[in-house]
Amino acid sequence: MADAASTGKSGKVVIRNIGLLLSGDIDKPILDADTIVVRDGVIVGVGKEADLDTDEPDLAVDARGTCVAPGLIDSHVHPVFGDWTPRQSQLGWIDSTMHGGVTTMISAGEVHLPGRPRDIVGLKALAITAQRAFDNFRPGGVKMLAGAPVIEKGMVESDFRELAEAGVGLLGEIGLGSVKGGTEAATMVKWARAHGIQSTIHTGGPSIPGSGLIDKDVVLEADADIIGHINGGHTALPEAHVCELCEKSSRAIEIVHNGNERIAIAAAKMALQLKCPHRVILGTDGPAGSGVQPLGILRMIAMLSSLANIPAELVLCFATGNTARIRNLNCGLIEAGRDADFVFMDRAQHSAGATLLDSIQLGDLPGVGMVMIDGIVRCGRSRNTPPATEVPVVVGAH
């Protein structure tokens, strides 16, 4: 179901009987707590039930011993308008991805719009329109941060000032437009940063007609805030070059589903070797030629945990708290003052893993039993994941 941006409030929500509470914080991924209290879409208490004010909730949820984690964040998507993508002529892809535990998506450019304007007035108008549209319309309740202009030759600093003043906070992938050189890109990245706009650069071979190779030297010179799909989208740079980017740049290391899996594993391992796992964030880079991936973030988590041998609770931070901190979002972490965006998960039925984390470490997808956004239940048992062994239940509502 596609929803207009919710104007209602969740009221007081109490979630109790949590079996495993994942914080999203890579420095302390597991919390010693079994209860969360929410008021009007914001977390107000996390801890043991006996220590919290759980009286008279408007909504009470029994987690039934399942895992609660921050809602997943997809750091790299390409929306157009509404819950439709012309790339695959598909409706409902955002709502479907919410059933994969994703509660926030971040646009890397509305590049699949048929006839996408490439003149400066047109690209600014498209970005502002997309930002406004997704502010007003949230398919499945998902928070879509859209309006990410693809920069073109001829833009000047006042263009970035105008975009920022209009509410645009992102740049689309640098390299998908006519700006492909490191020096020119670096100038525009600085202009964007000066006006509070965050930048992402395409990394690797061409993805769509009109894009081109962006090699390690261009990425390093441009110094964008996010090294977009460091494992290629789809075609990756040589592994040695990817490892060099991890080492020489201090920027975010974005690993995506629609990229080279071998290089994804190498990049994640290099980040751990360099002792900077907090820089790793995850995206799908969809919709794309390979389709829409409603479970793309969960699949990335299972792949990196099982094949890169990274503890599942840490990989889940790549898709939650790491992204929230790098993207300056108020979600992604379970702590007081943060948005009440949660995914309830359990091991899939008949998984070989004894626990949820064990099952992910073995490469199995978890089962999603419920998704909440701003403290409001957006779905129960997921229609897309394998069925969870146990699911939470609403036990009381005013």
Image (cartoon, rainbow, N blue to C red):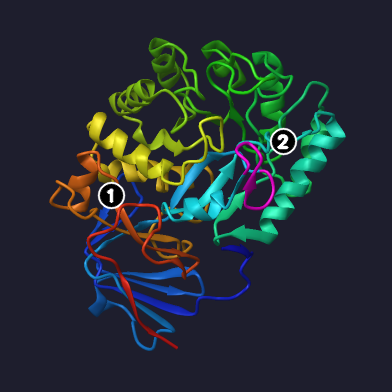
Q: Say which quadrant the N terminus sits in.
A: bottom right
- Up-down: is 7 above or below 67? below
> Which x, y percent locates residue 380?
39, 66
Q: Amino acid at mark 2?
A: Pro
Which residue is outermost to the front?
89
Left or right of 187, for residue 119: right
Provide the residue designation for mark 1. Answer: 28
> Which x, y percent locates residue 17?
24, 72
Say which residue appears at 53% left-offset and 28% top-offset.
228
Magenta span of residues: 80-89
Q: Amino acid at mark 1?
A: Lys
Say which residue appears at 14% left-offset and 46% top-offset.
352
Query: How far apart are the two marked residues, 2 and 1, measured between alpha carbons?
Result: 36 Å
> Which x, y percent locates residue 396?
36, 85
Name the quadrant containing residue 253. Answer: top left
- What element does badge 2 sit on? loop
> Which x, y percent locates residue 141?
55, 62
- Nearest the viewer among 318 and 77 is 77
Left or right of 241, for residue 26: left
Q: Main secondary structure of the magenta part?
A: loop
- What element does badge 1 sit on? loop
Name the quadrant containing residue 244. Answer: top left
Left or right of 46, for residue 193: right
Residue 66 seen in render: yes
Provide the residue designation for mark 2. Answer: 149
- Indicate which disc, 2 or 1, sits on the residue closer to the N terminus: 1
Say which residue appears at 62% left-offset and 37% top-offset.
198
Say which residue appears at 24% left-offset and 34% top-offset.
306
Q: In front: mark 2 or mark 1?
A: 2
- Nearest the viewer among 129 and 352 is 352
104 in magenta:
no
